[in-house]
Amino acid sequence: QLQLVESGGGLVQPGGSLRLSCAASGFTLDYYAIGWFRQAPGKEREGVSCISASRRSTNYADSVKGRFTISRDTANNTVYLQMNSLKPVDTAVYYCAASPLYSDMVSLDPIDFDSWGQGTQVTVSS
């Protein structure tokens, strides 16, 4: 199984920003679609954003469009999620995951992803 490690979470005030990182160990992220998901207490895991293996396609949940940006850094074998204008409803554990979806394919359905990181906590509160 592929190993993914998230980092960059923390406590931030409403309106603030955070950048989450998803680093791979032992394999190249470029061959996989990479998704970001989140899970708040008592709620189901939801897809936040995904970038295709080709990097030509991205998609976002409606709740984060215009505020979050997903990107790849091939040199550092890392995928980032830049989160701006954070709101208390964004509070959750954030996970990155890898999917064998090829080329331009993207998905926000957890069932399409088979390797997961351990998660990083994001708390938005004043």
Image: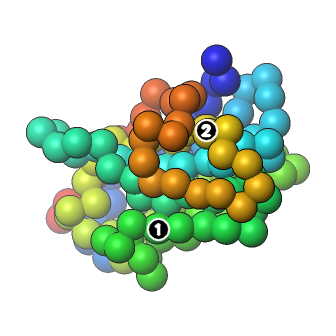
Question: Height in image: 53 above or below 2?
Answer: below
Residue 18's disc number: none
Extreme residue toward the left, this view: 42
Question: Height in image: 123 above or below 66?
Answer: above
Residue 108 in picture, x, y percent from top left: 45, 54
Residue on which the image places disc 1: 60
Within-10-Å neighbours for mark 1: few <14, some 14–19, many 20+: many
Measuring 49% from the left and 50% from the top, which residue is drawn there? 36
Secondary structure beneath label 2: strand
Residue 38 in picture, x, y percent from top left: 35, 47
Measuring 67% from the left and 38% from the top, which residue is drawn there? 100
Note whether residue 53 is visible.
yes
Residue 39 in picture, x, y percent from top left: 28, 43
Extreme residue toward the top, this view: 1
Within-10-Å neighbours for mark 2: few <14, some 14–19, many 20+: many
Residue 98's disc number: 2
- Kind of residue indicated by mark 1: Tyr
Numbered disc total: 2
Measuring 22% from the left and 42% from the top, which residue is drawn there? 44
Residue 41 or 99: which is nearer the viewer?
Answer: 99
Question: Height in image: 121 above or below 51?
Answer: above
